[in-house]
Image (cartoon, grey):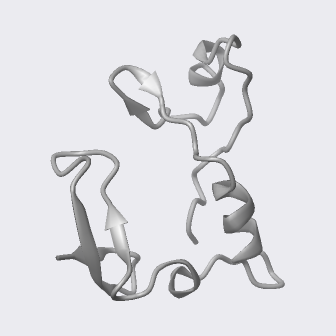
């Protein structure tokens, strides 16, 4: 399942995120430059809308070959590309 170990939280800008890191079961926050990365407006709603009646998210609903994508973290951060392939385990190939 996608996001089976993820916890999505909503925080006001002035709220501390440190207590989340000490919550039992939380391994780490998605971070960039030492700060938690917020999901852009509408992303969570789009994920929910893309689930089937059992709440299962199917990646082919979200990503299709030929779509333009932007890498948001890691060694290729901020690089633009075109989605070439989505593997059965959710791995992607970007050109």
Residue pictured at 57% horizontal, 52% vertical: 5
Whole-percent x, y for residue 26 in the image: 58, 34
Count of numbered marks: 0
Q: Nearer the viewer, residue 38 or 3?
A: 38
Residue drawn where x is 49% and y is 35% of the image: 37
- Determine the image quadrant of residue 35: top left
Q: Is residue 27 left or right of residue 4?
A: left
Where is residue 63? Give x, y as percent: 47, 79
Identify the residue shown where x is 23% and y is 74%.
Answer: 94
Above/below status of 86 relative to 1: below
Q: Quadrant of the C terminus?
A: bottom left
What quarter of the picture does the N terminus occupy? bottom right
Q: Residue farthest to the right?
A: 53
Percent from the top left, x then y, of residue 87?
Answer: 34, 85
Q: Nearer the viewer, residue 53 or 78?
A: 78
26 on left or right of 94: right
Residue 49 drawn at (x, y percent): 76, 73
**Left or right placement of residue 43 versus residue 31 in this view:** right
Q: Looking at the image, which residue is at 56% across and 22% down?
A: 21
> Of residues 29 and 64, which is closer to you in this image?
64
Q: Is residue 81 above or below residue 41?
A: below
């Amino acid at each position: 399942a996608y996001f089976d170990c993820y916890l999505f939280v909503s925080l006001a800008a002035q709220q501390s995120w440190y207590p989340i890191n000490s919550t039992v079961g939380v391994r780490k926050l998605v971070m960039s430059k030492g700060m938690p990365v917020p999901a852009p407006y509408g992303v969570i709603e789009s994920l929910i809308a893309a689930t089937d009646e059992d709440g299962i998210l199917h990646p082919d609903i979200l990503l299709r070959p030929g779509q333009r994508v932007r890498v948001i973290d890691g060694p290729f951060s901020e690089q633009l590309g075109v989605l070439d392939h989505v593997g059965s385990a959710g791995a992607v190939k970007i050109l």
